[in-house]
Image (cartoon, helix red, strand yellow):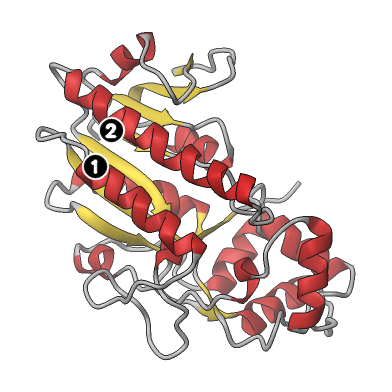
Amino acid sequence: MKKYQKIVLAGGAGYLGGVLADHHRELAHEVIILSRKAAPIKGNVLTIQWDGLNGGDWVNSLEDADLLVNLCGKSVNCRYTESNKQQIFDSRLIPTALLGRAIGQLAHPPKLWINVTSATIYRHAEDHAQDEVTGELGSGFSVQVCKQWEQVFFDAHTPFTRKVALRMGIVMGRDSAVFPLLMRLVKLGLGGRQGNGDQYVNWIHERDAARMTEWLLQHPDLDGVVNATAPNAVRNRELMQMLRQSYGIPLGIPSPQWLLEIGAWLIGTETELMLKSRWVAPQRLLDSGYQFSFAHAKHAVNDILSTRT
């Protein structure tokens, strides 16, 4: 197996950054995390401080990198106040533009730059899956964030660096943001459908989320937009049923939209995160021969629960 020299994860101190660092530490001599907070060295994983706003010594860490993955961005799991909206935009656009300028200064820039964006850029879809070629973009705040984010990414002048906008679905893992929350609802007897339950949930197992970045590194013909979702989306009602069955809980109280509106306000989030139908197809990955470790939600759920502590 080829050993890569260097993998850099910008904004990689969070959950997904940890998943990617654990995966790539076996593939590379060095994994570097760019983070606002210092952290001790863990084997061949080194944390370098940056603020995501200004240049500095961290720029040298990009020199001769095989892969740069940008994971920067404030969580959208919040109320869309004007202040939060601005932070959501700034936390994505500013570091992405900064990375683009930094790459442009290097004698030996990264071979591949992956910007992890979001599959929510597509419209609410219950009629058919949205792929990279025929998919229709949606409207609203979250879609505008994705559009501007990708524009900044692709506008960056990096002629010697291949670029991929990886439109990621909801990452499912034991320590992810979404899965533990859904399981908590199930245990409390609230694991019924959300809204009418017909909306599609585009998900991806954390192992595939990591393996995809390795696959893209190995396939230089892939650039531009790539959807990072499992090939079999499930409806909300089906996913909740799977989760209930995993704990032997036959029934769960459903949450109609009016109740979700109240709940979202109480916990400081937006109902769009639960009610928008995200049906997205990873067509380019499938066409390139990528084989999913977890193509079906039931297998993913069983795997995640089997590894819980």
- Please tell me which residue lies in front, 293 or 241: 241
Residue position marked by numbered label 2 in the rendering: 67
Q: Position of residue 133 (x, y in %)?
A: 21, 72
The amino acid pointed to by label 2 is Leu
Q: Position of residue 277 (x, y in %)?
A: 52, 78
Report the residue that reaches farthest toward the top: 57
Residue at 19%, 62% (x, y): give it. Answer: 288
Residue 89 seen by the camera? yes
Q: Quadrant of the N terminus?
A: top left
Q: Position of residue 214 (x, y in %)?
A: 31, 44
The amino acid pointed to by label 1 is Leu
Judge whether 242 appears above or below 116 on screen. below
Crowd class of label 1 (few under 14; some 14 to 19; many from 20; radius 10 Å): some
Judge whether 180 appears above or below 238 on screen. above
Label 2 near label 1: C-beta < 8 Å? yes
Report the residue that reaches farthest toward the right: 188
Left or right: 104, with 291 as reference point: left
Residue 255 seen by the camera? no
Residue position marked by numbered label 1 in the rendering: 217
Judge whether 81 appears above or below 156 on screen. below
- Please tell me which residue lies in front, 254 or 308: 254
Report the residue that reaches farthest toward the front: 82
Name which quarter of the figure residue 121 lies in.
bottom left
Q: Position of residue 127 (x, y in %)?
A: 42, 91
**What's the CA distance linking mark 1 and mark 2?**
7 Å
